[in-house]
Amino acid sequence: MLAAIGVPAFSQQQKAPESLLPPGFDQPAPRPQPSARPSPTPSAAPAAVPSPSGDVAPVGDDMGGDAFDVEEGNASAVAPAPAIDLSQYDLPKGVRRPLNRIGILAAGNAPFPADAFGDVAGATQVTLMRRLDAPVASRWVSIALRRALMSPLDTPRGLNGADYAAERAWLLLRMGEATAARGLVSYVDIDDYTNALDRVAMQVALATGDPASVCPIVDEAASAIPDRGWALAQAICAGLAGKPSEAGQRLDAAAKGKPRNDLDTLLATKVVGMGVDSRRAVTIDWVGVPALSAWRFGMATAAGVDIPDNLFATVGPEFRYWQALSPAVAPVNRAGAAELAAAAGVLSNAALLDLYAELDQANDVPDPLQKTARDLRGAYTGSAAERVQAMKSLWDAAESPRLRYARLVLTAKAAAWIPANKNAAEPDRLIASMLSAGYDTAALQWRGVVAPGSEGWALLALAEPAGLIGYGDFERYAGAASPRKAAMLLAGLAGLGRLSSADAQRGAEATKVGIAGVNAWTEAIDRAGARNQPAMVALLAGVGMQSPRWDQVTPEALYHIVAAMRAAGMANYARMIAVEAVTRAA
């Protein structure tokens, strides 16, 4: 069954995720631990969180009786010093984190329950995570999956907690969620790291442009993982620690057998040159570079080297999302990536507004960005009609479906401040903009304003938390909308339980939506919803929408995702996903 549900629902094409790093780096996978880095004992079965009071093993052998002797005239009178457990100073036992529940809390977001995967086997979870071809198409499915993966979750029976964190963080990285992945990796105490988590920690360091973050683990990881990248990381950490001589020796050793103009080595040398007393100066030339990699992205970001835009076409969209999240990248260079990241759920409406506020105050901003910042400022000033006109200018300037949706996210808060008025211009897009960022309370104030059967009416019908929709109202919309929009509305309303059973079947036949179709994926997500397993539902929803393009998302997949989320107590996510489907359908 895993083989069947590990592919997109209803024949969406999938390919296995490729390694993001240059040769020598591979996807993280558990493997036997060397004696230098023993793997901790497997985590206990899911249970309530115990107090972090586990014993701390002593460090090394006894240091000897004269290790701390102080000679003050009569050394023979000094009693032998007792052995000191230095681990108590490095990591007091009272602050050690247990491995049977790992995760972080995001400000303002309620975490998923610790048992959100229920009794789903750890092997099943890991298989689905590894096979999911991220990023996913839906902004709101991506948001739900991110919050599930980063929440404090019980480690499944039989899995090592650090390895479980590595699998979750690796999926977050492929989704573009570098910040969330970093938080998850950082939760695990360094003493508990495994080879799998070492590898993911390196990937996180590259995605966040922070190679120094692997310095606490670099020596042990380099001794256990014979990859050239770790040897270069040792040189970087030595340089950043103010040891230029050691850094130079390690760089020379790592560069042995490579051409003098090897870009990966030159970028590492550039980062080494940022250390204290370093005399290494390197000029980076991207001419002739065939493709970007995570190593090149991470080193260039850390060194403040601009990456040519054309190289981003050689990698997946997650690289753009990493760029959008990086404070080391200038706002001018982040703007385009930030809008794409907002459409994907990686950036919020507030984060996007903050970025354009910086651009509005900056100098030497290109004219197109200046106009966008100016129009966005206009969306908050002046009369309601003037503000709507400024938003319309932003919406109409978008040249692709993803950017058009991103602009709705950009203007969501401004749209929420427009009073409901039957004479207002662009009511449908105002409502779509509000709901793209979850401003459903403001949007629902337009219920008595929008025309029945309009796009705004359809979006509000999905945003309503309860109540049946008459079939005549649906039919009125379906008669005026495109067949795909009508199919998405039918799937959303049926999944939310907003149509009677008879009307849902009647509408499914009229729109040719096979809501009664069954395959391994539909059975799995329906079962997860019925068993109240919200994290499993979110993961399977990602499987059902693992497509880079919205036009490949099927109404059938939408129906099962929405229905399962509602059954698992995630009705708010379900409503926003259904709204997004109609908004983005052509």
Image: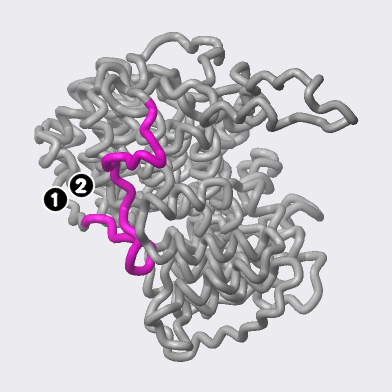
Q: Is residue 395 left or right of residue 362?
A: left
Residue 142: say if magenta.
no
Is disc 2 surrounded by few (<14), some (14 to 19) or many (20+) residues within 10 Å? many
Residue at point 45% right, 9% down? 48
Q: Which residue sits at x=28%, y=19%?
A: 157
Highlighted magenta segment, given as a residue range: 16-40
Report, in whole angstroms, how far the alpha carbon at label 1 lies from the one at label 2. Answer: 6 Å
x and y percentages locating residue 216 in the rendered image: 57, 46
Which of 455/26 is in front?
26
The residue lying at 37 percent from left, 61 percent from top is 227
Q: Is residue 485 visible?
A: yes
Position of the C terminus, as image quadrant, is: bottom left
Q: Which residue was labeled with disc 2?
A: 8
Q: Are marks 1 and 2 in contact (CB under 8 Å)?
A: yes
Q: In the picture provided, is 11 more to the left or to the right than 174?
A: left
Q: Dot 1 corresponds to which residue?
A: 11
- Mark 2: which secondary structure? loop
Please identify the residue farthest to the bottom as the structure is shown: 287
**Image height check: is 496 above or below 549?**
above
Give the number of marks.
2
- State the image coordinates of residue 79 (x, y, percent, origin top left): 75, 18
Q: Which quadrant is the N terminus positioned in?
A: top left
The answer to whether one can see residue 372 in this image is: no
SS class, disc 1: helix
Q: Residue at x 89, y 30 (%)?
A: 72
In the image, residue 548 above or below residue 521: below
* Side of 133 where 40 appears, left or right: right
Three-letter code for the amino acid on which mark 1 is drawn = Ser
